[in-house]
Image (tube, coloured by chain):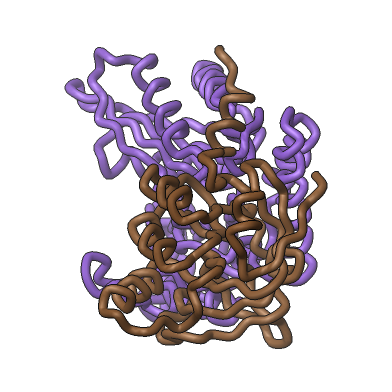
Amino acid sequence: MAARKITTPLTDVVVRDLKAGDAVQITGVIYQARDAAHKKLVALIEAGEPLPFELQGAVVYYMGPSPAKPGNVIGSAGPTTSGRMDAYAPLLMQHGLKGMVGKGLRTQEVKDAMHEYTAVYFAATGGAGALLAKSIVGNEVIAWPELGAEAVARLEVKDFPAIVVNDCHGGDLYEEGRKRYAKTV
Amino acid sequence: MPVRELDVREVTEAVKAMCITANYDLPEDVYDALVKAREAEESPVGREVLGQLVENADIAAADRVPICQDTGFAVIFAEVGQDVHLVGGSFDDAVNEGVRQGYGDGYLRKSVAEEPAHARRNTKDNTPAILHTSIVPGDKVRLTMMAKGGGAENMSSLNMLKPSQGWNGMVEAVVDTVSRAGSNPCPPVIIGVGIGGTIDMVTVLAKKALLRDVGSTHPDARIAAMEDQLLEKINALGIGPQGLGGSTTALDVFIEEMPSHIAGMPMAVNVQCHAQRHKTVEL
């Protein structure tokens, strides 16, 4: 698959041009955040307080790494199941979030919000944490270090491999791919 | 038969070593199954994903890093010989100490939260282990460690079926569990099915079923045929590697059964991701 190179932060022009099934390589800064961090991010937005990072154009990576061995940038770093962040994702998109990297199914509410706010959902290969860590060249915890693996980190990535699952036009690779290969037995 | 003494410190050492190696080294049977699936997979995207999984296993083994960042809940099956006298402290504490040391020294992720309904505080050492102990004949202790990730476990199901639903009802429930899970549990998955017993026992059976080698055939030809039928139906769903579409949704299906109450037909489906990590030692 020829992968398309994209850089962060993402703009609406780039997001609109991405279609379900497109292979991409992401370069730039993405933000690590999973369950506990999302709960705190949403609480900050609801309280009208500043967030630990600029949400406009941002890409979040649903991931909680294993501890880095001495000399390594990060431990293993593959995606976690995105559906657990569905309750929080629409509000983040409303406030400027443009990209989500994870694995697994999203709710219709999240897909609708992606259409409304022009955002994109990428899948990275779940269970390939040792391989994906090779594309992460910088790692700095920027909020809630007490959460351990669930802290928010600023990750610098280079040619991070992912695939567009849900685009902002309603395209859904999980549905389309499954239909293409389903058989009757 | 004389009683053999075994210091529980040996148990701690063994558990520690298994936690680390299980998380770094994908078992050969699973590795071979991924290589085979990469050749057989119909979808080009699916083949690419399977190639990444093989490469990932190679990197983890060479660099001594975890295959997956979710290094799991530590599930331990202990078969303790009845002619063994365990000395030097509590057996359960020794197992938990092994998990504590393994997850610490091995740079494994601590993924256990206490007070799950409220505080959800990380226990910071991945304890407690999920420990299943049974007493068996002999003077050995056999320990199996399984690193069970959360994403696939979440997609598992318990089905209290009616006897009238029969085998067809079970097929429907298993296929439905995998179908609804879709891309969530990191397919290609391995499916453990427990049949019979009570709600507690049927889930243990489903988990134990996952310890079989991928590609192995059940010694009971009747059950082997049931497993083949389920595998064919699951792979016909089209979910494919990582749910992106394809012909490899599951690598294998394993069934364990035991008698059930005359009024019931419990069935548990334990979903396992492709990173099926486990190790066994005998002390």
Nearer to us in this view, B84 or B21: B21
The C terminus of chain B - image quarter: bottom right
Vertical comparison of B171 with B133: above or below: above
Q: How many marks are shown on the rendered structure?
A: 0
Q: Is residue B218 visible?
A: no
Q: Is residue B53 left or right of residue B243?
A: right
Kindly identify the residue that appears in the image at 54 percent across and 39 percent down. A172
The percent coordinates of residue B35 (x first, y second) are 77, 41
Nearer to us in this view, B75 or A128: A128
Q: Residue furthest front?
A: A13
The percent coordinates of residue B89 (x first, y second) are 38, 80
Kindly identify the residue that appears in the image at 33 percent across and 71 percent down. A42
Kindly identify the residue that appears in the image at 65 percent across and 49 percent down. A18
Vertical comparison of B88 with B86: above or below: below
Q: Is residue B188 left or right of residue B177?
A: right
Q: Which chain is purple?
A: B
The percent coordinates of residue B197 (x first, y second) are 28, 34
Q: Is residue B21 left or right of residue B126?
A: right
Q: Is residue A32 left or right of residue A45?
A: right
Q: Is residue A160 visible?
A: yes
> Which quarter of the picture shows residue A138?
bottom right
The percent coordinates of residue B241 (x first, y second) are 64, 40
Kindly identify the residue that appears in the image at 79 percent across and 67 percent down. B62
Query: In this structure image, what is the colour of chain A?
Result: brown
